[in-house]
Image: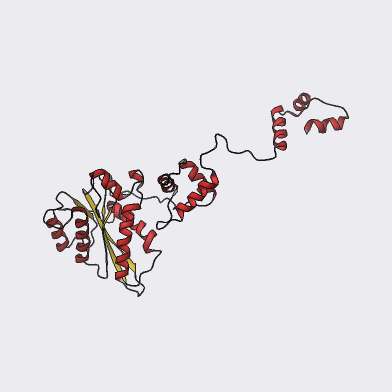
Amino acid sequence: MIREAVAASLARPVGLVPVCRELGIARATVYAQRARAARVEPPGKRGPRPIVPDPELLAAIHSVLTDPPFLGEGYRKVHARLRYRGIRADEERVRLLMRQHGLQSPGRPRRELGPRVHDGTITTLKPDQMWGTDATSVLLLDGQQATVFGVYDHCTCELLGIHAALKADRFEAITTLQQATRMAFGSVGEAIAAGLKLRHDNGSQFVSRAFQAELRFLGMESSPSFVRAPEGNGCIERFWRTLKEQLLWIQTFATLDELNQTLKTFQAHYNQHWLIGRHGHRSPAAVRRDLLGRPEAA
C-alpha cells in the first residue's frame, strides 16, 4: 500500500525499509494492515471448541429462563439449573451469552446507606435456631386488602408458614406461627420449640401479650429487631421481595381462599425448587435434609 504509492510516484521500485524509515512507522504496522485487508472472515474464538456450541447453549438458557414459575433469575442460577440438567458450561460463558443477547435480569442502582444500627449477621448454621416472622399486604380484585403473614428459617431459607387474612391482628400472626411449628416439629405443644429464637419487628401483632404468651408456651425466645432497622429482620424481608416478584405482583386473586390456596402451592414449590446461592445453589428442602440427615418437612 504505502510502498506501492511511493513507487508509483517515483516511477521505480522502492524497498519497504527506506519508506518506513522515511515515514517514521514500523514495518510491523504495514504487515498488520496487509493481513487485515486480506482477511475475509472475522477470527473465531480462541482455544479449543466447547463441548456445547453457543447456539445449543443459548437455546438451553432460553429454556431455563422460560421454565415457570420463577422469573428474573440471574446468570448464576441459570448456570446452576443448566448443571442440574447435565449441561456443562463455564459460568462466565453463560454470563457473556446472556449479556450479548439481552437476557440478563435488570439490575438496580446501588444505594448509599447511612450508619447502620444493625451490625453483624442474623443467619444461623443449623435449622430451627432462629426464625423470622413479618407481614406484607396484597389487594384482592374486590378492593379488599389482605395481610399475608409468614415465618422463615434463617438457616435453610425455608418458608415454614404462610397465611393470608383480612384482619391483620395478633391471632392471625399466631395461626402462621403454629403452622410453622407443625411443619418443623410435627405438632404444637408446650416447650416443643425450646431454644429457638423468633426475630420479629415491633408491629402491634408481634409485641402483643397474646403473641408473646404463645412464644413462651412454645418455648421460643422473643428477639425483636431494632426500631426503623428492617435489616435486623432481613431474611424474611428478602423473601417478601421474592414472593412479590414471583407471585403477588404478577397474579390477581378474586377471593381470600384463592389467595391462600395459591400461597400454599407457592410455598411447596419454593421450598423444593428455589435455589439459594449461599448454600451452593441448593433448595431449602435439600439444605434441611443435608443438615439434619432426615427428610425435609412435608
In which quadrant of the rendered image does the C terminus lie? bottom left
Is 143 on the left-hand or right-hand side of 11? left
- Can residue 123 be seen from the camera position used here? no
Quadrant, the N terminus: top right
**Position in image of residue 244 (x %, y %):** 36, 60
Residue 20 higher or lower than 66, as above or below: above
Residue 32 placed where, x, y %?
A: 69, 32
**Extreme residue toward the bottom, this view:** 142
Lateral position of residue 43 relative to residue 287, left or right: right
Residue 123 placed where, x, y %?
27, 46
Q: Residue at x 30, y 47 (%)?
A: 286
**Colour scheme of the picture:** secondary structure
> Residue lying furthest right in this view?
11
The answer to whether one can see residue 27 in this image is yes
Indicate whether 108 appears above or below 53. below
Where 122 falls versus 136 (above or below)? Answer: above
Tell me which residue sits at (21%, 59%) in the image: 177
Provide residue 145's location: percent of width, then percent of height. 31, 70
Between 288 and 201, the one lying in front of the other is 288
Is 195 displayed left or right of 298 in the figure?
left
Q: Is residue 213 above or below residue 93?
A: below
Q: How many marks?
A: 0
